[in-house]
Amino acid sequence: MHALFDERRYLIPFRASLLPQIFCDTLIVGSGVAGLRAAIAAAEHGEVIVLAKGDIRKSSTAWAQGGIAAVLGTSEQAVRMHVEDTIDTGGGLCDASIVQSTVAGARPRIEELRRWGMRFDVNEEGEISLGREGGHRESRILHSDGDATGRELVRCLGQQVQRTAAIRVFENCFALDLLTVSDGDNSPVVGAITHHPKYGLQMIWAWATIIATGGAGGVYRETTNPAGTTGDGIAMAYRAGAAAADMAFIQFHPTTLYVAGAERSLITEAVRGEGAHLVDRRGERFMLGAHPMAELAPRDVVSRAIIDQLADTGDSHVFLDARHFKPGFFAERFPGIAAQLARFDIDPEHDLIPVQPSAHYTIGGIHVDAEGRTNRPGLYACGEAACSRLHGANRLASNSLLEGLVRGEITGRTCAEQREPGNGPRTPKRIISDIALSEHGGLDLTDVRSSLRSVVWRHLGITRSGQTMSDVRDMIDFWGRYTLDKIFDDPMGWETQNMLLVAALICKSALWRQESRGVHNRRDFPDAREAFRCHDLWRKGQSEPATIDVPTVATGAPT
Ligand code: FAD
Ligand code: SIN
């Protein structure tokens, strides 16, 4: 990774004292499930500001289809099975105590959502109806409006946030960087510098800052993620001295609608949970021989089987076959997907649905402890931006919304510790960022972005190899030299700089991890290796990662 990636502390030059000043107790960057749930908890001990870089209704959370994995009853066995499924999927890297506390924390979070007015789908007896997805041995997935769980979740949490007087939400407000008075390890994070199209640059000072900016799927050409999922929070935390962990682990969803030229959109795994088959162009089910759970094997297994299938046949996609469903069932159970398919004249009762895998979920992220603390005082993280070690090397389907709810609440509650007596009054700090003007020529940012996304998709995708990743590292360094030394004045430029940094971190971690485990699959190291049964943590200025061993109780075997 070129030195420039580590040298740049802030994306833009500024003098803090010359900009408008805003104060709060807790600043939360991100308004998905993790940010909103953290905000509600943090509002119990002070004033909260939540930032969304666009509209609050646009996030991965809002797009979630399948649902929330949660054990609703009090059965210890049901909790144990959810814990085991999570760990078995996680390729030997789950932290068993994080898994246990997250799974056990589901019931109170779901009960409160229901109290706050969230509508879950119910069966004919009026009980919550539970779906099933890959890697789950039981049906335990709560959903809303068939395949629009995320939309209902954001509506419900958004409404609860609106009812909470201590929370202000700033939409269209882009966080560029976290503020620290010095680069020293003990210098706390004291807020963020932001940009709003109407108000320009602003300093938001806070005792505690929580990063809940979601993942980085947007660095891949093929992704299920909404535009703007560019890893900003991971990049800004790294620039501020926080550790990024397990960045090699990017999860690929097996079934994204593949229509050449059209935007990719997810076909929820719940479709397979209801019994749809994956078939090749001859109509043959290729998952039957690939895994005992066939189409409901964990995602990494299914994605790899599809990639192998495509390599063998030279085809661009495989198919989902739901033609055997009862007439009317598909449209009733999956109304959003049925409508999306209809736009392309695909009728799942009569037609096969063309699908291919694409980047879906960032398992790695900002390293946090069990309460959401990073290694920088005053800085916390939760949700997809964080690496809580819940998912290990591969995430169990629908555990992410659960993580956002449970770990978001814990993080929002924990950051009250920043207001301990002795922390001093909230005052603006003297922070100056100076950046020399670039001597390089102008740039076509769109071109840099699309070249980066293509290369990352091709060589940091479902299968990888050391030689091509070394080439990718050199390409990212090359683009970085011409892009990171520039000063941009809008989100397109800042996002591109963040994407380059996050891609460089994914590449660095994937090159270091000389093994195959979970979603990280190397042709040159096809097996899991005991030496790498650990988490890799990368910090600015360090060429080798710090590693953390996995507590021995996490018994999941590498897949
Ligand atoms: P997000 O929901 O991604 O929210 C990120 C927030 O950060 C946004 O508000 C954004 O505006 C803000 N932000 C980002 N950068 C900045 C910045 N620089 N400045 C200011 N604000 C910023 N998981 C499940 O468990 N079940 C499912 O059914 C499911 N289905 C999915 C379907 C799709 C299509 C996708 C893409 C994902 C799905 N996932 C699902 C994964 C899950 O939705 C996400 O992992 C989860 O919602 C992430 O929540 P989050 O709060 O961490 O971040
Ligand atoms: C899906 O509905 O298939 C996505 C679920 C998830 O990402 O957890």
Image (cartoon, rainbow, N blue to C red):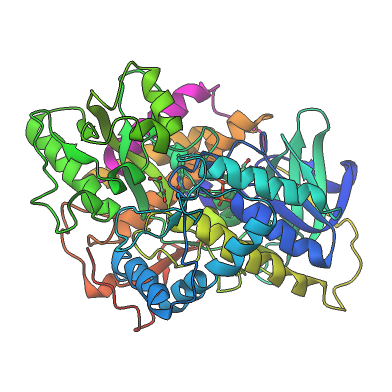
What's the residue at 73%, 38% (across, down)?
173
Q: List x then y, in percent, for residue 317.
A: 21, 30
From what the image shows, is residue 1 above or below residue 549? Answer: above
Residue situated in front as seen by the camera: 218 or 358 = 358
* Residue in the foreground of this view, choosing between 193 and 277: 277
The number of discs equals 0
The residue that appears at 38% across and 78% down in the rendered structure is 77
Q: Quadrant of residue 37?
A: bottom right
Q: Position of residue 345 (x, y in %)?
A: 33, 15
- Which residues lie in the magenta part? 435-463
- What x and y, as percent, mark residue 105? 55, 71
Instruction: State which quarter of the image contains the C terminus.
Output: bottom left
Instruction: Give above or below for 371 relative to 522.
Output: below
Residue plotted at (51% across, 75% down): 101
Horizontal and vertical percent for residue 310?
Answer: 15, 35
Of residues 37 and 452, which is closer to you in this image? 37
Specify the quadrant of the image occupied by residue 189. Answer: bottom right
